[in-house]
Amino acid sequence: MNRLFTFALLTGALLLPAVAAHAEPTIQNEPAQKLNWQTTSEGVAFAALVGDRFAEPYMAMVKLPAGLISPAHTKSANMFGVIISGAMVHSTVGADPKDDVVLPEGSFYRVSKDLAHVSKCVSDTECVTFLYQDGKFDFLPVAGEPAQ
């Protein structure tokens, strides 16, 4: 129970800046069937929840097609997520694939800013994740590194 309490406090502290920026006295309800999904040319879909992902810290739902493997890349913001459905792997560039940790639904992940990594949807169905980044969205390919 102590770990759960610590996790809840840490998560709240991490999300506080994004929430505080939008702290009006209201309730925001976003039923899944009403999310406004925007799909990229790579097939990854984003549904904005809080913030403009191209300008500031943000929260979004993200869908990745089954089997998708990203090119090796970095981000200039820390990334925090919870797997809603499907199963994902986030691995550091150059790591041994036998060390991959498969994250099923309900799992938490954090990818530090500036860390070269690959993200994979390893399930037979699309992967859906809740995502928070503490800075604006970017996707910075790592030169000379193919997808794993």
Image (spheres, rainbow, N blue to C red):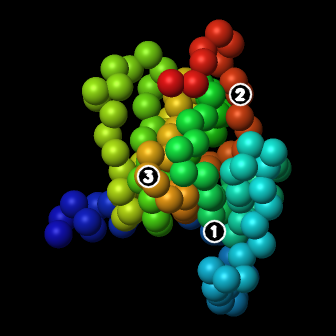
Q: Position of residue 4 (x, y in %)?
A: 26, 66
Residue marked by disc 3: 123
Distance from the alpha carbon under mark 2 to that under mark 1: 26 Å
Residue marked by disc 2: 140
Which residue is more in the foreground, 83 or 27? 83
Location of residue 140 (image quadrant): top right
Q: Nearer the viewer, mark 3 or mark 1?
A: 3
Location of residue 142 (image quadrant): top right
Check contact, mark 2 vs mark 1: CB within 8 A.
Answer: no
Residue at 33% across / 60% down in the picture?
Answer: 7
Element type at mark 1? helix
* Sooner in the amino-acid sequence: mark 2 or mark 3: 3
Residue at 62% across / 28% down in the picture?
Answer: 71
Q: Position of residue 10 (x, y in %)?
A: 39, 58
The type of residue carrying mark 3 is Ser
Q: Is residue 29 above or below residue 140?
A: below
* Sooner in the amino-acid sequence: mark 2 or mark 1: 1
Residue marked by disc 1: 19
Q: Position of residue 91 (x, y in %)?
A: 43, 31
Q: Position of residue 5 (x, y in %)?
A: 27, 67
Element type at mark 2? strand
Neighbour tally class for label 1: few under 14, some 14-19, many 20 plus, Cα within 10 Å:
some
Q: Is residue 21 left or right of residue 145?
A: right
Label disc, if present, on residue 72 of the rendered structure? none
* Sooner in the amino-acid sequence: mark 3 or mark 1: 1
Q: Nearer the viewer, mark 2 or mark 3?
A: 3
Q: Is residue 143 above or below residue 70?
A: above
Neighbour tally class for label 3: few under 14, some 14-19, many 20 plus, Cα within 10 Å:
some
Q: Identify the image quadrant of the N terminus.
A: bottom left
Distance from the alpha carbon under mark 3 to that under mark 1: 31 Å
The type of residue carrying mark 2 is Leu
